[in-house]
Amino acid sequence: MYLGRKIFTTFTILLLIPLIVIGITVHLVFSSSKVEEFTSYSENSIKQLNNSLDLMMEDAARSTLSLLYNRQLINILREYDYDSSLEYRNHKHTNEFSLFLSGILYKKEPVYAIHVFTNNGWIFSHMGDYKIKDKVNLIDENWYHEAKDSKGSWLINSEEYPSYYLNSNKSFISLVRILKDPIDSKDIGAIKVDFSPEYISRLTEQLPGEYWQILRGDNPLFKRQKNEIIEECKVNNSWIKDEGTGDKYLCVTDTSVKTGIQVSNIIPEDEIYKDIAEFDTFLSILIAVCILVSLILSYHTSNYLMKPLEVLKKQIKGLQNRNSLERLDINENADIAILSGAYNNMLTEIKQLVEEVYELNIRNANSEYKALQTRMDPHFIFNALESINMTALKNKQLDLSDMISELGTLIRFRLKNDEQLIILEEELEFSKSYVSIMNQRMSENLNVAWDIDTEAMNIKVPKYIIQPLIENAIIHGYNGKKLNIYVIVKLKGFYLVIIVKDNGVGIDKAKLDFMLKKFKQESEIGKYFSAGRKNNGIALENIKQRLNLTYGTKKELLQIDSEKNLGTTITITIPMNEGDVFEKGSIS
């Protein structure tokens, strides 16, 4: 794939991914908010309808309650008992009930009619004779038996085409109650309030969708459209499915605490997602247009960027084939101009490097010759020491001969081993050679004791790590009295511990604290141990740095303890791997 195609693809992907992510996010947010908004609107509508029905029922019950406190009307009802001999309604009685009931109905739009039924079936109402019958057989009325079973409580009832109406094709929701005689609590009749179907229809116009019903218990009171699936609407905010058609409906329902009336509404899924589908269509078109524009922009942008790069590519190919070493002159694009400038600088540097490499080859040849020549210098030194040693033996100067032999051992050790880590045994041999020379010099004033764990002899340690500690103890701890130095090497768990302590002059606390602070911050403690010496070997600063480079800085590997006139103790802790084997002959 060419670079231009890669740039085009990259630009396209960088534009497509945000567009797709934004589109999905907007869709999810809009869908969620739309469903939530629709559900919230449906719930509020149903709750408002239930509240309206509660107020309607309470007002009707309260208004008709005054009948029980009207002694004249109660006396009239007593005359129409089961065993009454009256074969016709008294005209006066009819007028009194008509006036009373008309007064109750004044400005009560929700109520369609109020009827009072006597025990022997006569009907008193505010309606004229052309709208309502004079008498019914209460034994044949289901609502009457239900009202008697309610034992004097109000009963909410629904009835299609009540039998007491003349030429009526309406369905009514009614409030029914058996009337009790205030004196002996005997049944003296029943009162029935029929609510206006038109008023209830106006209340239900606010409900979304076509499928809803009003019921009390399992008794449907009112519904707009017949749909068997609505009977399954029991749990609010749940989805129900019509197994016959496969359609899904959102169930929204609310039950009144006061009247027990349940209003249920099922809303088709298609109706809820209609606005969402329209929005998704618009969003898809918008994203498609943005994608098309982004593809066009990506194509032209990649071509614009690649034009100067093509020139640079051809020039580099010519350089690769050694056909062209011409400089570039591109000023159209600032970034490409930087590349051309870098290319021109590279050409200049290549020419300089060719000349430098030529000179370097000559210098390397001279250096190699000199290196071969310097290899002869150690042989000369050892030959000279051997001649001096023979002379010392010839003159029976055995101490001098021993010192020369030990010096030769030290020089040979430093020349033959270039490794950073050596086994502990070699380091001890080197240190003991140094101690042997110092014993010749200090005689009985120096005593070095060795306590070495034999299992640690083959463990590798940094080179020149014990001898400098002994040297520091001699140079800085000796005060003219006998100097005792103890070299202790022990294995403790997974650590090798090296301790060099002496009974020399020591260091006072203030100076030691200052040195330790500097030691941690700037690693300058070696300056105090090596002050006044020109060739002091490997100082503590050097040992500390080499330990940190080899084993890390998580653990304090070098510790110094000292007291004035009591001596100094230096402890080195070298971590071992958990699986190391410290057997004789193995190298950890």
Image (cartoon, rainbow, N blue to C red):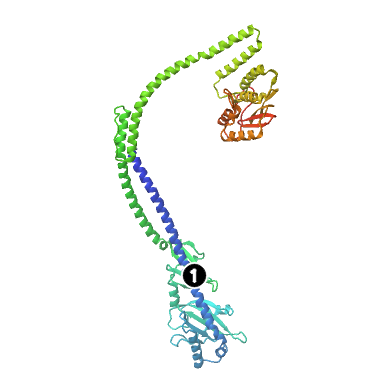
Reply above or below: 76 against 223.
below
Reply above or below: 440 against 330.
above
Tell me the kind of residue under disc 1: Lys
Q: Residue furthest top?
A: 394
Residue 369 position within the rendered picture, expressed as x and y whole percent measured from the top left = 45, 15
Which residue is rendered at x = 40% and y = 59% of the image?
A: 276
282 sits to left or right of 397: left
Residue 408 position within the rendered picture, expressed as x and y whole percent measured from the top left = 59, 15
Q: Secondary structure at mark 1?
A: helix
Residue under numbered circle 1: 47
Which residue is rendered at x = 56% and y = 12% of the image?
A: 382
56 sits to left or right of 322: right
Residue 197 position within the rendered picture, expressed as x and y whole percent measured from the top left = 45, 77
> What count of labels does the image hold?
1
Observer-nearest residue: 230 or 44? 44
Screen quadrant of the C terminus: top right
Residue 4 position within the rendered picture, expressed as x and y whole percent measured from the top left = 33, 40
Reply above or below: 574 against 429.
below
Screen quadrant of the N terminus: top left
Badge 1 density bin: few <14, some 14–19, many ≥20, Cα 10 Å: some
Observer-nearest residue: 319 or 341? 341
Observer-nearest residue: 26 or 471? 471
Residue 141 appears in view:
no
Residue 410 appears in view:
yes
Observer-nearest residue: 529 or 34? 529
Reply above or below: 200 against 89.
above
